[in-house]
Image (cartoon, rainbow, N blue to C red):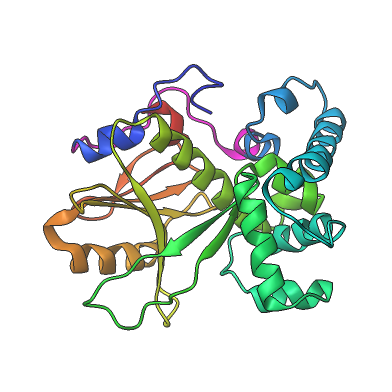
Amino acid sequence: QSEIRSAPGRLLDRLFAGEEPSAGEDTVIGDDLLLTVLQGGYPEALRRPTPRRRTAWLEDYVKLILDRDVRDIANIDQLDRLPRLLDVLAEHAGQLVNHSSFGAALGLSSITAQKYVAILERLFLIRTLVPWSNNRLNRLVKTPKLHFLDSGLLATLREDEASALRDNKTRFGALLESFVVSELLKLASWSGRRLSFSHYRTRDQDEVDVIIEDRRGRVVGIEVKASATVKPDDFRGLRQLQDVVGDRFVRGLVLHDHDRVTPFGEKLQAAPLSLLWTM
């Protein structure tokens, strides 16, 4: 979005430099945010003037990638399973990776499903976030989390429409989370810092959707919410993270559908999702 909007795209650099988050002028909320997420970020798709034509381009793009590029990186006997696997993964976006479940849906072994998921990741269609680890916590879930690298592609695979997503915040939330992860990865690629990405979840279901860590071990935590309202309880995972890492905790943000930054404690704020391109 920063590139599309000719925006600075320096959010991560500025957060790690200790700057306070500010909303900026190009704030996007409500239906405008929903449509932004549905469209995704492929420039060729965005050049299409209608949702139907964008969908057609995305469907053709996936077919081209799976028909042409897979053979360049792997020898696969059951190439016809990849489109079906991608559909299965789309329904599990934002969830923990479960190769046994993915494989069972297609009649594949867990090992084969794991191999195919790795191929789709090498094709830059999906991204798995590794679990964050710390010696002080022994109740952390140690399973990667699945995301798609373009929310428009994910919406196309799930056949999502704006009218349905308005009334289904849970489904929109999974789409929104992949959108945010994708945008953060782009921002990291433009940064001069070496940054690593992970996620945090405990067996008690406390979580932080994205943890970004620099080479000095300093940490920024990001939680994503599809709603316009944020409660103190939404910061529970971020507060746990802050307590564990101590002075290395740089910032904890709950990004949500709003136009203002709201403080929720030291180094903790709720902030507009459009912070991704306004800072």
Please name the residue shown 30% across and 41% down the image. Answer: 194
Occupied quadrant, residue 56: top right
- Is residue 67 depicted above or below 227 in this figure? above
Magenta extent: 18-33
Q: Name the quadrant of the N terminus.
A: top right
- Is residue 118 depicted above or below 188 in this figure? below
Q: Nearer the viewer, residue 165 or 197?
A: 197
Please name the residue shown 34% across and 40% down the image. Answer: 261
In this view, the residue farthest toward the left is 247
Is residue 273 visible to us here?
A: no
Percent of width and height locating residue 230: 43, 56
Please give left or right for residue 193 compared with residue 227 in the image: left
Is residue 21 inside the magenta stretch?
yes
In this view, the residue farthest toward the top is 6
Percent of width and height locating residue 218: 21, 51
Is residue 158 visible to us here?
A: yes
Percent of width and height locating residue 121: 61, 52
Please give left or right for residue 188 compared with residue 125 in the image: left
Please give left or right for residue 278 compared with residue 170 in the image: left
Occupied quadrant, residue 167: bottom right
Is residue 46 inside the magenta stretch?
no
Percent of width and height locating residue 107: 83, 76
Q: State the predominant SS element of the stretch in magenta.
A: loop
Q: Name the quadrant of the C terminus.
A: top left
Please name the residue shown 79% across and 50% down the image. Answer: 157
- Is residue 96 depicted above or below 150 in this figure? below
Q: Nearer the viewer, residue 172 or 44?
A: 44
Occupied quadrant, residue 85: bottom right
Number of marks in the rendered image: 0
